[in-house]
Image: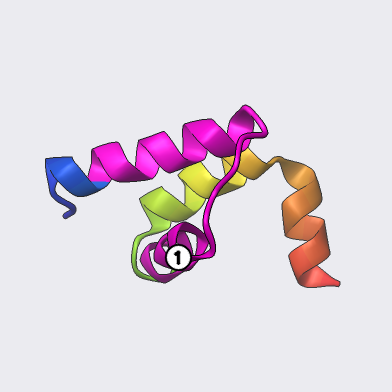
């Protein structure tokens, strides 16, 4: 289970990704680490990035 602070941080980063705003490398690494631990966060990331991102990762 993630803390409220972490959840808000994740949602803020994902919102910026959806709006094509800038996201730092550190934030991307943070999302990557959490997505490996939590299937819920992984789903959030997949829905924010869209289907193109998963096809790129699988190529």
User: In the orientation shown, which residue stands out farthest toward the top?
Assistant: 19
Q: Quadrant of the C terminus?
A: bottom right
Residue at 16% of width from left, 43% of height from top?
5
Who's the residue at 50% across and 31% down the image?
A: 15
* Position above or below: 13 against 55: above
- Quadrant of the rendering where the N terminus is positioned: bottom left
Q: Position of residue 27 (x, y in %)?
A: 44, 58
Image coordinates of residue 23 in percent, x first then y, are 54, 48
How many labels sit on residues?
Answer: 1
The residue lying toward the viewer, choosing from 10 and 23, is 23
- 41, 22: nearer the viewer: 22
Would you name the residue on which mark 1 appears? 26
Please name the predominant secondary structure of the magenta segment in the image.
helix
Image position, residue 21 (x, y; %): 61, 35
Q: Quadrant of residue 51?
A: top right
Displayed quadrant of residue 54: bottom right
Query: Is 8 situated left or right of 16 in this image?
Result: left
Tag 1, which secondary structure?
Answer: helix
Q: Is residue 53 left or right of residue 9?
A: right
Magenta segment: does it hold 22? Answer: yes
Magenta region: 7-35
Give the farthest residue toward the right. Answer: 59
Residue that appears at 59% across and 39% down:
17
Residue at 51 percent across and 60 percent down: it is 28
């Amino acid at each position: 289970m993630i803390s409220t602070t972490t959840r808000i941080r994740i949602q803020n980063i994902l919102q910026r990704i959806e709006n094509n705003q800038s996201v730092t490398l550190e934030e991307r690494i943070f999302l990557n680490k959490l997505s490996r631990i939590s299937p819920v966060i992984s789903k959030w990331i997949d829905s924010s990035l869209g289907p193109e991102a998963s096809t790129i990762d699988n190529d």
